[in-house]
Image (cartoon, rainbow, N blue to C red):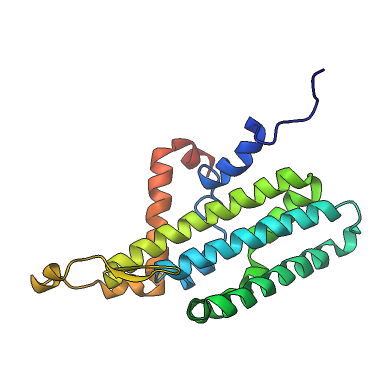
Amino acid sequence: MSSDKEPLFSAKNLKLITTPIGPQNPITIQVLGICSALAVTAKLEPSIVMSLSVVFVMVFANLIISLLRNTIPSRIRIIVQLVVVASLVILVDQILKAYAYDVSRQLSVFVGLIITNCIIMGRLEAFALGNKAWPSILDGAGNAAGYGIILIIVGFVRELFGSGTLSFPGFGTFQVIPQAFYDLGYVNNGFMILPPMALVVVGIIIWIQRSRDKSLIESH
C-alpha cells in the first residue's frame, strides 16, 4: 500500500529551509531585521547568541501559531501572535540572564526587541497561520537561520578587523591576529566596531549575492 503522506524532508519541505538561507534571505533580499544587525554585531559572541535566540523563538512561535491557527479569531490574531512571541522572548531572556549573564548584558534591550522583529511577525502572518505544524517549523528554522547567518558573518568581520579577536559563547575570546603583526605596525580598524559599519558589511554581502545571481537585480 502506498502512503499519501508527504515525506518529512521532501524537496518541497527542504526548500522551506534552504530558500531563506540563500536566494530569499530575509536580510539581504527582503531587507528585514536590519536593526539587530546594527546593534549586536560588534562582536561574534552576541551575534551567535542573538541568532540562536531568534531560531528558538521563531521555530516555536511558528509551531504554536500553526497548532492554534484554526481556533484564533481573525480580528485578534495579531494580539495572539504577540502574546506567543513575547512569552518565548521572556523565556529566552531569563535563560540568558541565568546562564550567560555577560552576553545578556551585551545584548541589552535587543533581546526584548525580538518581540517586534518583523521577520518573525511576517512569517507567523504569512505562513504559520495557513500551514500545518511541520512545514511551519521548517519555515521558521529556515528564515531564522538565514537571519542568523548574516548576523554571524557581520559579527565575525567586525570583531576580527575591529578588535583582532573572535569570541565564542562558552569559550571566551581568542586573539586571532598575531602580536607580531602589531609589532610591525598593524592597527585595529576602530571604525569596524561602530554601528554604521554593520550596514557597510551587510551592503557588501548584498552586492556579492546580487552580483552572483543576476535574477535578483532584474526582479528588484
Judge whether residue 217 can be spotted in this image: yes
Q: In screen coordinates, is 187 left or right of 45?
A: left
Q: Position of residue 202 (x, y in %)?
A: 42, 58
Which residue is depicted at the point 59% across and 79% down?
98
Asked whether 183 or 27 is in front, the reply is 183
Q: Quadrant of the N terminus?
A: top right
**Is 75 on the left-hand or right-hand side of 210?**
right
Q: Residue 31: which quarter of the image?
A: bottom right
Residue 214: % across, % down: 44, 37
Q: In the image, residue 159 lies at what x, y percent?
A: 34, 68
Residue 111 position, x and y percent, is: 59, 73
**Rendering quarter of residue 172:** bottom left
Q: Is residue 135 left or right of residue 19?
A: right
Q: Residue at x 53, y 67 (%)?
A: 50
Can residue 200 be spotted in the picture? no
Residue in view at x 11 percent, y 69 percent: 180
Front position in the image: 128 or 137: 137
Up the image or down, 56 lies above or below 191; here it is above
Identify the residue shown where x is 49% and y is 52%: 28
Q: How many marks?
A: 0
Residue farthest along the left direction in this orientation:
184
